[in-house]
Amino acid sequence: MLLSSIRRGFTSRVGPIRTLSSHSEMKDFLDYLDSLKNYEKSGVPKGAGTDSSDGFDLGRMRCLMERFGNPHSKFKAVHIAGTKGKASTAAFVSNILRNEGYSVGCYTSPHILTIRERILLGKSGHLVSAKLLNDLFRRIKPDIDQAMKEENGCISHFEVFTTMAFLLFADENVDFAVIEAGLGGARDATNIISSSGLVASVITTIGEEHLAALGGSLETIAMAKAGIIKQDRPSCKLHDVKLQMLGDHQLQNAATATCVALVLRNLGWSISDKSIRYGLEDTYLLGRSQFLTSEEAEVLGLTGSTVLLDGAHTKESAKALMNTIRMAFPKAQLVFVVAMASDKDHVGFAREILSGVHVETVVLTEAAIAGGVTRTTPASLLRDSWIKASGELGIGIVHDGMAEYSELLKEQPVGSESNLGDGKTVLATESCLKGCLRTANQILSRRGDEKRVIVFTGSLHIAASVLASLAG
């Protein structure tokens, strides 16, 4: 697929982005969820994803399923685990199946603008409606409250919402449910699907993210993620199929999804080559290699710039992002706006970005995670990591703790822009999105009419901040 085709796929979502329902429709429901333990917001305990005494308690989920008539036994499931690429692979697989005419439920996390994004239903693949969630919540709340008492209040946000997803899939009588594991696999709340209901287990890339929670080494991560594989059920390991998609990492995700489709075909399910091709071509996700339109860039005050949103937050995904940028924009000025969670490898991420190609400016900022700041990294700490990474790489920088930096922001005569930073990377810190946009514009305006690409990355949450500003 050509770059222009990929951009059309992403930008066609502008309308739906701007018409997403207000959270006020689901206030009671969302307030209840917010009252529960949320590991996306607080961080995952050490060893939580391992099949050990430190792991999450799957007994709670089994009890919840029994309380509601075991809805997870009423559909066929494709279960997806891995460090990176789970949501993209789930989207590819879901679209392939929908193109074949199947009714599909898809469950992924986290969301960008609304929690409704986590559950897609039916042949259309539309977001679950606020009405369906509200109706289901009112129906099951008395039982959830009773279960909460019996479990001493230990049932989590993710466990409740996973229960709701499985109930909706059962109620809608979906042909397939494509389910992304939340953490690890072996002790993930989604891992209650029996081998009889599982048509395929998928493990995408294995990396070092959540190292402590999954046991401390790449070997233990692989073992924890392999916990979703059931005896006598086909599993797809990663294959590198050369499809024309934007970025090598998406090539791998599409290849994995293709392998899943072929496995299902071998099991007797009808899946044509046409459905595979159209399913892959139709796939998009907010905040993953997403280009904004020129009109959206103008709303942000970035007129004339190409704006890319990508939720890369590991050193592996940063490397994949830089490979994509080198391919698509080999000669453009690059400005990065970066916000990251506190449990990520900040130096490793910075090293991959800085070593990929010359970066004009990096604006370091902060973004709320799951509505809170517990896991948010202060911009000043991110700056320390980028200074360390630049020193390791021998890359010259100018940061906002240096006198030279203030000179960059002063008015200078026309024609002096070629001396901006003397080829060094400019590091700036801002506490909010508005400040980031102002600083990026202030520095880029000194570069005249050169091609400019502004990349918002480091987490899906900074991408969400940008999209929320457009939706608002």
Image (cartoon, rainbow, N blue to C red):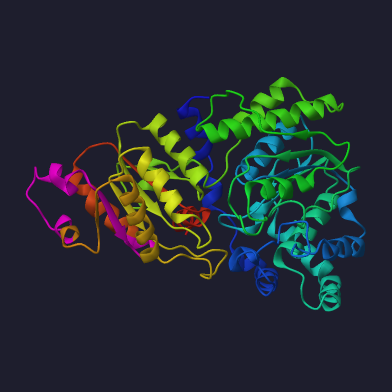
**125, above or below 367, in the image:** above
Horizontal relation, residue 457 to residue 401: left or right:
right
**251, above or below 401, in the image:** above
On the image, the x and y values in percent for residue 122 come to 76, 43
On the image, the x and y values in percent for residue 30 come to 66, 69
Residue 420 in magenta stretch: yes
Residue 146 in magenta stretch: no
Q: Nearer the viewer, residue 115 or 296?
A: 115
**383, above or below 94, in the image:** below
Q: Going 16% across and 62% down the picture, which residue do you hit?
A: 403
On the image, the x and y values in percent for residue 162 come to 76, 58
- Snapshot quadrant of residue 188: bottom right
Range of magenta residues: 406-435
Horizontal relation, residue 2 to residue 428: left or right:
right
Q: Nearer the viewer, residue 186 or 163?
A: 186
On the image, the x and y values in percent for residue 265 come to 81, 25
**198, above or below 44, in the image:** above
Is residue 91 visible to the viewer in this orientation of the structure?
yes
